Image (tube, grey):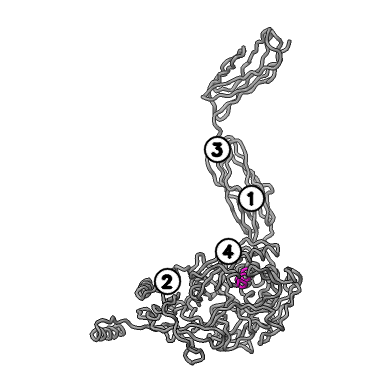
């Protein structure tokens, strides 16, 4: 209250002094925007940006109750907490921690009041994308945007000369897009740019023994999980040409069945053609590695944008959310805490971001590897992998010399889940975040198709291959977790470090103990490979749990209709999990009087089928009944149901003739017996007739209820034509008509 009173007094003074000026506090932001090189003179000023130049920026609002969010995150990842892995939806997160609607609307009014156009909003009320001229943005933020000579690269860049102080009652978290000092670059290397680099490609199933995405699946997993039901998101700063992905699959004689969505998060083109000087190598290989590891994903989304705020904001508000995310791009923000609000939202919503750790060896204080050292991402280092054969299992692995790792260049404090590990690691910091967390193959051993210009073998390498691999592997883990009735994993680092310090470490990870990136690979955690690479189903079971042996039953069809006095069937199928292989005895209950049920066979061993036979007596009452099929194996029982509908027969009668063919000489007569049979409660007299033929019936009418016989006499004249003649006998009664035929063979 006191601050509001003081502000009001200042405003009153201002109004009295300058009646034409409206008092509005200039509010600094929570994060920094000024580049040090523009202040210390390392970047030579070349003047101002043209005032009419159009710009697109993102106004980012802070989260509410950040202390409460930090408490929630601890609970979400504490196995002893009732809230363990009870993740929030976007709507729940917004209601608890998102900016208020009032604050969000006030920022929109501020932007529009300064001549800026609102180009995009977000459903968590964090991002507001605006466009406008340089002069409008400078006026709104009280800055000057200058052009500078980059101190280490042969290019110019633009940047603000001071921190933004907009006239807002809401203190913004950040404004993205005010400079292009650091251009995001993929964690990707070409072997021909490293004269001393070796491909070591000897066991891949691709051209030149190069590795395919499917080879990585065989090496690091080799099981039946496919990522079914899971969606995966990739961060990309440029679009792609899906024709390159098609070429890859065509050349390796494989098929991709995962739908791919290209999502422009801020108007950035999703197309990337070499003819337009756009390189989609990174984008395509990200897809092949993620899809190779998880070929049964429900979807893969490429989030394409020009700013981290736009891309991460889209990832945090997607519908549906991607539980596994991957970024193979690195950059250096003016303030390393810039994206923390998005990363915390990921963790609260059960999303995990894998970030390539870089390709320049051990991290230094000047390494541009952000956000690989952020505490809310999983940093992925590089290895040199050998498999037992083409498309074969893991054989050996060493640290990749170019893989990133070390002590956080951005000085992120060491997270709680890493402190115990760091205390046992000789090169680790006890104060700052260490990386990487995990690793996977990154050497120059891959098959890559890109730029609509063909494909290469063993030319490209980088941790940009390893990050999407891990995202795909996590989709396998989450598939198993869901199948076991558990939630998805969310942010996996706390669990990874717990496993790393456990007795099951060697069965869950490939511990990489040879090679170096400047830091040696050692037993256990190290700054070259983290905990190592995934060890097949061991790590999946450790993170997702192993399903207890069990079975389930299903009926096909689940609804059967049978007429009284008839029978039908349904197939009962048992599906097993957790290695269940015992006999399952089948029984039925709930069937009505007059219905009998049998099973052939009477029991199923493990996974299999049995035919359920259903016999309905003519006396069974019509109606719909639920029959419960129970499978029993020891103390375990499972059920399924079959809906039985019993229908009655309609009142009816039929006619028949015996014999159906008679031989009669001219001037003589012959007979046949006509029989009427009734069903369905028919109760009426049946009258017999023919047309155009001299016959008599005795009796002509079969008395009610209509069941009986009549003798039909056929009189043949002396002039009748020789040969066969067909007589149609018609029976009428109870509003129904039926017929039968008698063939008369006339002879001399």
Residue hosting label 2: 125
For label 3, the residue is 647
Circle nearer the viewer, 2 or 1? 2
Give the label on residue 260, or none.
Answer: 4
Magenta residues span 279-287
Q: Nearer the viewer, mark 4 or mark 2?
A: 4
Mark 4 vs mark 3, foreground winner is 4
| Front of the two marks 4 and 1 | 4
Question: Which image quadrant: the C terminus?
Answer: top right
Q: Magenta stretch: residue 282 in it?
A: yes
Residue 671, quarter of the rendered image = top right
The reply to whether callout 3 and callout 2 are in contact (CB within 8 Å) is no
Measure the C-alpha gap from mark 1 to mark 3: 23 Å
Residue 272 picture location, percent across and down = 57, 69
Tell me the CA gap for discs 4 and 1.
37 Å
Location of mark 1 (residue): 572
| N-terminal label among 1 and 3 | 1
Does residue 316 sit above or below 588 in this rendering?
A: below
- Toward the viewer: 373 or 672? 373
Q: What count of labels does the image hold?
A: 4
Question: Dot 4: what SS?
Answer: strand
Can you tell which mark lies on residue 384? Answer: none
From this view, report whether residue 672 is shown above or below residue 195.
above
> What secondary structure is found at the residue carrying circle 1?
strand
Mark 3 residue element: strand
Foreground pick, 303 / 559: 303
């Amino acid at each position: 209250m006191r601050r509001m009173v003081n502000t009001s007094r200042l405003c009153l003074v201002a109004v009295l002094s300058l009646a034409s000026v409206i008092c509005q506090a200039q509010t600094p932001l929570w994060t920094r925007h000024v580049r040090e090189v523009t202040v210390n003179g390392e970047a030579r000023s070349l003047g101002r940006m043209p005032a009419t130049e159009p710009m697109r920026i993102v106004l980012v609002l802070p989260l509410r109750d950040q202390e409460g969010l930090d408490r929630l995150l601890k609970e979400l990842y504490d196995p002893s907490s009732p809230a363990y892995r009870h993740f929030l939806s976007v709507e729940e997160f917004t209601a608890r921690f998102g900016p208020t609607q009032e604050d969000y609307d006030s920022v929109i009014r501020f932007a529009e009041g300064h001549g800026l156009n609102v180009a995009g909003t977000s459903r968590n009320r964090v991002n507001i994308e605006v466009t406008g001229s340089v002069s409008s943005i400078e006026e709104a933020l009280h800055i000057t945007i200058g052009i500078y000579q980059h101190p280490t690269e042969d290019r110019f860049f633009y940047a603000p000369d001071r921190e933004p102080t907009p006239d807002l009652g809401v203190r913004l978290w950040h404004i993205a897009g005010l400079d292009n000092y650091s251009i995001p670059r993929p964690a990707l290397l070409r072997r021909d740019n490293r004269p001393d680099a070796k491909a070591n490609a000897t066991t891949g199933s691709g051209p030149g023994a190069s590795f395919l995405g499917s080879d990585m699946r065989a090496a690091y997993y080799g099981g039946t999980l496919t990522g079914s039901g899971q969606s995966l998101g990739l961060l990309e700063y440029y679009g792609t040409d899906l024709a390159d992905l098609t070429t890859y699959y065509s050349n390796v004689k494989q098929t991709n069945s995962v739908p791919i969505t290209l999502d422009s998060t801020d108007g950035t083109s999703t197309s990337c053609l070499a003819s337009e000087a756009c390189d989609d190598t990174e984008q395509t290989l990200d897809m092949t590695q993620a899809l190779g590891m998880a070929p049964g994903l429900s979807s893969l989304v490429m989030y394409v944008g020009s700013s981290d705020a736009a891309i991460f904001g889209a990832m945090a508000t997607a519908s549906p959310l991607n539980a596994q995310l991957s970024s193979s791009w690195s950059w250096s923000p003016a303030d390393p805490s810039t994206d923390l609000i998005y990363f915390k939202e990921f963790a609260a919503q059960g999303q995990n971001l894998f970030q390539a750790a870089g390709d320049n060896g051990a991290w230094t204080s000047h390494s541009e590897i952000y956000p690989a050292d952020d505490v809310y991402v999983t940093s992925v280092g590089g290895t040199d992998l050998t498999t037992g054969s083409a498309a074969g299992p893991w054989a050996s692995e060493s640290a990749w010399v170019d893989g990133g790792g070390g002590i956080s260049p951005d000085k992120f404090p060491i997270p709680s889940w890493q402190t115990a590990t760091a205390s046992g690691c000789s090169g680790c910091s006890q104060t700052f975040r260490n990386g990487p967390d995990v690793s996977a193959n990154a050497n120059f051993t891959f098959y890559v198709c890109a730029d609509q210009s063909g494909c290469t073998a063993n030319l490209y390498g980088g941790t940009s291959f390893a990050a999407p691999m891990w995202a795909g592997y996590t989709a396998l883990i989450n598939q198993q977790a869901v199948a076991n009735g558990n939630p998805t994993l969310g942010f996996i680092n706390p669990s990874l470090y717990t496993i790393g310090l456990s007795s099951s470490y060697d069965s869950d990870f490939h511990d990489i103990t040879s090679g170096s990136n400047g830091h040696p690979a050692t037993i256990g955690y190290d700054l070259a490979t983290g905990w190592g690479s995934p060890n097949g189903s061991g790590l999946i079971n450790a993170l997702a749990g192993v399903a207890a042996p069990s079975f389930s039953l299903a009926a096909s069809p689940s609804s059967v209709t049978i007429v009284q006095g008839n029978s039908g069937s349904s197939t009962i199928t048992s599906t097993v999990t957790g290695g269940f292989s015992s006999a399952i005895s089948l029984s039925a209950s709930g069937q009505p009087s007059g219905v009998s049920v049998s099973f052939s066979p009477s029991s199923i061993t493990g996974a299999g089928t049995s035919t359920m036979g259903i016999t309905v007596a003519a006396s069974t009452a019509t109606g719909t009944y639920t029959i419960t099929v129970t499978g029993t194996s020891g103390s375990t029982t499972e059920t399924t149901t079959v809906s039985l509908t019993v229908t009655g027969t309609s009142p009816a009668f039929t006619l028949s003739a015996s014999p159906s063919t008679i031989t009669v000489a001219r001037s003589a007569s012959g007979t046949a017996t006509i029989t009427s049979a009734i069903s369905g409660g028919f109760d009426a007299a049946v009258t017999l007739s023919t047309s155009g033929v001299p016959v008599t019936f005795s009796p002509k009418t079969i008395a009610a209820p209509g069941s009986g016989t009549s003798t039909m006499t056929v009189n043949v004249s002396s002039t009748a034509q020789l040969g066969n003649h067909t007589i149609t006998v018609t029976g009428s009664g109870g509003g129904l008509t039926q017929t039968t035929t008698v063939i008369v063979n006339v002879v001399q």
